[in-house]
Structures are given as C-alpha cells and as structure tokens.
Amino acid sequence: MVEQNGHSPQLTKLRGRLADGLARARLNQTQLARRAGLGRTTVSEALSPQKPVPSAETVAALSRALQLPEAEMLALQRTAVQQAGTSTTERPGRPIGEWAPHDLEVHRAGPGPTAAGSDMSAERAWPAYVRREHDRVLDKAVDDTMAGRSRIMVLVGASSTGKTRACWEAVQPLADQGWRLWHPFDPTRAQAALEQLHRVGPRTVVWLNEAQHYLGDRAVGEQIAAAVHRLLVSRERGPVLVLGTLWPEYATQYTALPIPAEPDLHSRVRELLAGHLLAVPDAFDAPALAAARALAKDGDRLLADALTRAHADGRITQDLAGAPELLNRYQHAGPAAKAVLQAAMDARRLGVGLHLPQAFLTDAATDYLSQSDYDQLTDGWAEQAYAELAKPVHGKQAPLRQTTPRPLRRPPAPACAATTGAEAGRGPQFRLADYLEQHGRTSRRHLCPPASFWHAALTHLAHPDDLNRIADEAEKRLRLQWAHHLRHQAAAHGSPVALALLAVLRAEAGDPDGAEVLARQAAGHGNTDALRQLAVTRELAGDWDGAEALLRQAAGLGDTDASRQLARMREATGDRDGAEALLRQAAGLGDTDALRQLAEMREEAGDRDGAEALIQQAADHGDTDALHQLAVTRELAGDRDGAEALARKTVVYGDAIALCRLAVMRESAGDRASSETLARQAADHGDTDALRQLAVMREKAGDRDGAEALSQQAADRGDTIALSQLAVMRESAGDRASSETLARQAADHGDTDVLRQLAEMRESAGDRANATILARKVADYGGASVEYEHTAWASMLRMRWPHGMDPDGTPTAPWQPTMGIPYSPLTPSAASSP
C-alpha cells in the first residue's frame, strides 16, 4: 500500500512519531543532530517526507535522543523498508546484532549439546568471557569511536589465545548503538577488502580477522593498508573501528625495518600498524585465573572443565579451543597419519599456501616414515590416514581437514600467473589446524624435510609463489639441485621473482641475451627489478645505450626507481632538462625520492626557492627527512635563519628531529645560547633528545652545572633516561643523596639499570656497604630476574669473588667453579657455590 506522496503508511507513521518527539523535546534539528551524534543533513533527510526510508542506525540514534521506544521505532523502519521494496543503504556490512560469533571466526570452545534436555544451545558453545588487561585497551578504543573518533586496533598473539573473542566482546556496546559490521571474505579476503573498502561508511566495524590474509597479500597488501588508512583519516566517513588479529611472526615481519638496498615490501602496512598493535598474552595471569575460577564456581561448566587441565600454566583459551587435544592427536597418530601431518607442517613453515594439495601431501609423506613403517603400508594407507586426521577434536577442529577454496569470479591479472595458481587448486585440498601449524613452526624449525618433500613440491605444486618460496627454502638448506629445478618450475608458471633471479644468474654466467629475455618476461608480470639490475651491468660495461634502453622499458612500466636511475645517467651526460623531465614523471607517480633528487639539482643550480618548494612537496607526502636534509644543508652553508625556518616546518608534521640536529650542530660550533633555545623548542614538541645530547656535550666540556641544568629540563618533561643521566652526574659530583633520589625516580618508571650503575660506582670507590644496599634495591624492583650477567649482584660478584668475599662483603672460601648449578642473585648466601 502506498499513499499519495509515494510513501508507505508505516514510513508516514515513523516520521510522525519522530516529529512528535521533536516537538515534545523542544529542539530544533541542529540541536537534535548534536544530541543524537548525527549529521545535520542526516536528521533533515530522516524527517523530510520527500526522502527515502532512513537507515536503522539513524532511527535508533534519533529514538534514543528523543526518548522514544527504540524497538517500536525500528519495527516501523523495517516494515517501511519492506513496503518500499528497496534497501536504505548500499554500504558494506550489516548490523552487529545480526552476526553470530562463529560467523566471524570466533572458535566454539565446547562440543555443544550432546544430550537431550541440555541447557546449552548450539549458539552458546563457549564459556563466559574472562576480561584481561588488553580488554581495557580495546574498551578505550571503542569509547573513542563512540565519541566520534575513528580507531584501529590489531591484536597480536599466538594461535588460540582469545584474540577474535576479545574483538567480539569489545564491539557489543556498538551493537547497542546500531553500528554495522563488515567482514570482507568473498571471493577472497584480500579482493573483497580492496574492492569494497572505499564504500565503508560511518558507524561501521571493519573486521579483519587473521589480518595477514589482507595486509600480507603479495599483490594488494600495500593497497589495502593504504585504503584502510584513507578510511581512518576521512572525517566524512567516520567514525569507524577497524579490528584485526595477527600471529606474532606476522606482526614482526610487517613492522621490521627494511634491509638496505632491498625492496621495502611492507611500507604502508608498517605505517598503518605503528602504535596500534595490542599484545594478547598466551596465558591467563593470576587475576584472570581467579575470575575464571569464580565463573566456574558459579556454574560455567566449560571453564570448570578447562581449569582441571590448564590451571597450572594458565593456557585456558588454548585448552578451550582444542589445542591440547590437537597436539595429543598428533603425538599419538599412526605412522602414516603422522607422516602426512609432518609433511603439512613443513609445507606451511616453508611457505606453501593454506590449501595443501592431497597429491602433494601423499607423495611428500613417504620419506617421513621409517623403513619398517614404510614396508607395512597397505594399498589404502593414504585414505586411512586422511580419514584418521579428519576426525574432529574438542571445539570441532580437525588436525587436517579437507577444504574447498572459493573460485575466482572474475578474470584476474596478470593472466598467466593467475591461471597457474588456479591449476594448483585441482584435486582435493587440505588445511592444517592452526595450532598444529604453529607447533610445527616451533618444534620443527631446525629440521630439514626429506627428499620426498622436495620431489613432491616439484611434481605437484603449481602456484608460482609457492614454488618460488620452496626454492628459496631449498637453497637456504643447501638443497641446491632441488632449488635449481624448483626455481625453473616457478619461472615456467610465471613467477616474476623467479624470472628476475634467473635473469641475473644468466647475466652472471655470460649470457646477456638470455638474461634480457627472462628480465622482459619478469617485467611482463610486473617485476622490473631484473631490468634495472641488467641496466647497471650494461652501464658498468660501458654499454650506455643498452642500459638506457632497459631503464626506459622499466620506467615505462611505472618503475620510478628506473626513472631516477635514468635521470642520473642523463645528468651525468649534461642533459639536465632530460633528467628533470624524468624525475618529474617519477614524482607524479608519488616518488618522493624523485622530488628530493630534483631539489638537490635545484639547490646546486642556486635555485633555493625552487629546491625548498620541491622539498615541501615531498614533506606533504610524508617524507619529512627531506626537510631535515635541506635544513642541515642550509646550516652548513651558513644560512642559519633558513635552516631554522625549515626545521620548524618539520614540527608541523609532528617531527622535531631537525630542531634537535640543529641544536647539536650549534653546540658543536660553540653557540650555546642558540643551541639551548633550539633544544627547548624541540622539547616543547615532545622530543627531549636534544636536551640530553647537549647535557652530555656540556659534561664533556667540563660545564657540570650546565649539563645538570639541561638534564633536569629533560627530566621535568618526563624523560626517564635524563633522570638516569642526571643521577650518574650527581653521583660523580659526590652528591649521593640527590643521585639516589633521582635513580629511584627512574626505577619507578621502569629503568632499574641506573641503580646498578650507582652500585658499581660505589663498589669501585670502596663503599661496599652502600653498594650492597643499592644492589638489593635492584632486586626489589625486579632487576634480579634478568640474565645473570646483567644484574647488580652479578657485577658485584665479579668484582668481589677474586678477593674472597660474597656480595655482603664477608669473607668466603676460595671460589671454585662448579658445573650445572645455577646461581640465583636473589640469594646472596649462595655466593660460595655459584
């Protein structure tokens, strides 16, 4: 039924209720928008009879602001949508309340109902939630989003430590506020995220569980990271909350600084994750165990059951997720089943993808068997092994389960590489349980797979990335013949990395024509590294024309490194205009290094304004190092005002390093007043390094008062390293009371090393009694739990034992080394038998 205005009766009724509520509240639309946390336009459209049905989120927010019955208003909204026959939004996701936890990969922790009349529903197959320290951090992030600020948090922890469950519990307050949740996974996680992130709207949780499948994707991981960053900083699309999970090894891989002269594969991912990683511990601490026991006592049978097995080590979540049973199944598996699992573990730790072809596992497993077990195999051994491993354990997990990868639904690019990857999916495929995969990475990390593994990889693997990674691992283990054949197989299947490497090897072997053919093939798949490397070889050999031809081809494929390399060659031959054109082309593709190179050319030519404008462009794209360099250049040239102006510009980007550098340079030049002014300015912006560095320089110059004053300024701004530095200065000056007070302040902030230093200084000065007192204080702060040679007790033992005294200064019998008896610094009386 539709009224004369084209809208349904339910929509008219909905708007009437909202209008009545607005009138009773005596608010205008702007005031209502502010109270509801909505935009003014959103409120206006919700009340306008010319606009379509408002979203459920909007209706929920308005109902709460106007104190209207939310459930009734949402029922009217749903009916209006049905009558209109259209959706109110095309944004990804759906209301959080419509998601079930297991749909978001929250592991069930129990077997569910097994007997008639059980009071545990299938949906309630997990225990009550035990809150831990990381939950409080997550709560703060959720509070921020409810206040209108977009946030991202990525939980880092080992398999089955409760990361996903923590995310689920954290978003429940948002569910009550009408937020949506989007879990990108179809057709693949990475593709779904890349294609839909730009459509995510306000009040949405973006669910990136197992974030390595998004951020670690070799083809689009960096693009996904950039898209997430764009979403987080876009005010009109916020607030949003991005939640993800990672294993520690992936977090380490993505955040590690790049190796010089090697490609930086995770630049955008590293930037996105910086400051947003949240550690989830492997085990429950004492307060969490106490909370679990209380819940178990109140009737939570799953927690009570887990505590009977895991109360000693606190690994409650792993037990609930079935990890111990998975490990038990592996350890007690039949010989054939265990061999298949070991082949699967080695495949995953050496880089093969999640989906392992059955033919590969079967052929790989044979050399994992002893000769006796191999002789006893029957014709159906493989089928029996897979059937054994498919049986579920606690939590409905299986050691090795058959899986079906989702097919690609659109033509991929490049065609060759994708096609070969698709061929790898033919035949049954299996996935190893997460916990067993991680167990294999740890327990088998020093083992080399047998020959059947390498042969099976060469015979059955067809994805180019899998083949190339296995070739790398074979090479590391000096299985060089296998590495050679695997590398060629990877190249045959279109691996650009393998093609580029083979091109370099051909060039080194004296086959330039063959090398160029392979390099061009690699470039056709998007890898231009070999073209650039061959260009360097040609240039060194004097073949400038050949080098330029290779670089032009790489630059034409969007390789800005090649453009800069080519520009350098042009500049060397005097073609500055050609060099600048190439650099501008690279800069247009977002290469800030090209902007730097252009700026250097302008500076050398005397065009300082032009150089500074280019450096400013680089800084606007996030490259503040360029401003630092130019500031130093101006300082060295004697242009102090210009240097300071540039240094202050870096502060706008949240970076005061340039001010610190200038402060140190001025101090070295003897201009103390100016250096201290700059150091204070840097400290005002949160960077106290300059104050500490100046303090050290003043101390070395004999100006103890000036050094202490600078250290005190840094300490007053919360720099605990400065507290330690100042404590040592006071100790050296003989002011022991002040030095110890400062050292205790530093220790209260987590730096116990300064107490150890003071103990050693007093010991060296012959004051053994006070040295012993300070050493005991290190232990009181927990310093005695660190490695033996790093404790204050150990330092004193090394000094006193040659003199026949224990740490308290009392004589002891001549020290004789004993084997196998650990020494504990917490028990000084044990010094006679370390």
Image: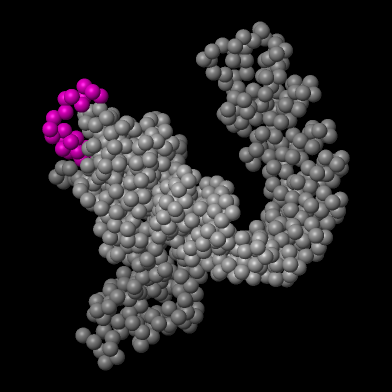
Quadrant of image for the N terminus? bottom left
Image location (x, y in percent) of residue 672: 85, 52
Is 589 above or below relative to 377?
A: below
* Residue at 62 percent of width and 9 percent of height: 816
Image position of 738 (left or right of 805): right
- Asked if residue 515 shows in the view, the reply is yes
Highlighted magenta segment, given as a residue range: 370-396
Colour convention: one colour
* Residue at 76 percent of width and 55 percent of height: 662
Image position of 12 (left or right of 271): left
- Asked if residue 215 shows in the view, the reply is no
Image position of 79 (left or right of 675): left
The answer to which quarter of the image holds residue 720 is top right
User: Which residue reaches farthest bottom?
Assistant: 4
Image location (x, y in percent) of residue 379: 12, 33
The answer to which quarter of the image holds residue 574 is bottom right
Quadrant of image for the C terminus? top right
Is 438 above or below relative to 334?
A: below
Image position of 505 (left or right of 575): left
The foreground one among 335 and 574 is 574
Q: Is residue 137 magenta?
A: no
Image location (x, y in percent) of residue 723: 72, 42
User: Which residue reaches farthest left?
Assistant: 379
* Residue at 26 percent of width and 42 percent of height: 459
Image location (x, y in percent) of residue 54: 35, 77
Is 25 above or below relative to 485?
A: below
The foreground one among 379 and 31 is 379
User: Which residue reaches farthest top?
Assistant: 813
* Residue at 65 percent of width and 23 percent of height: 793
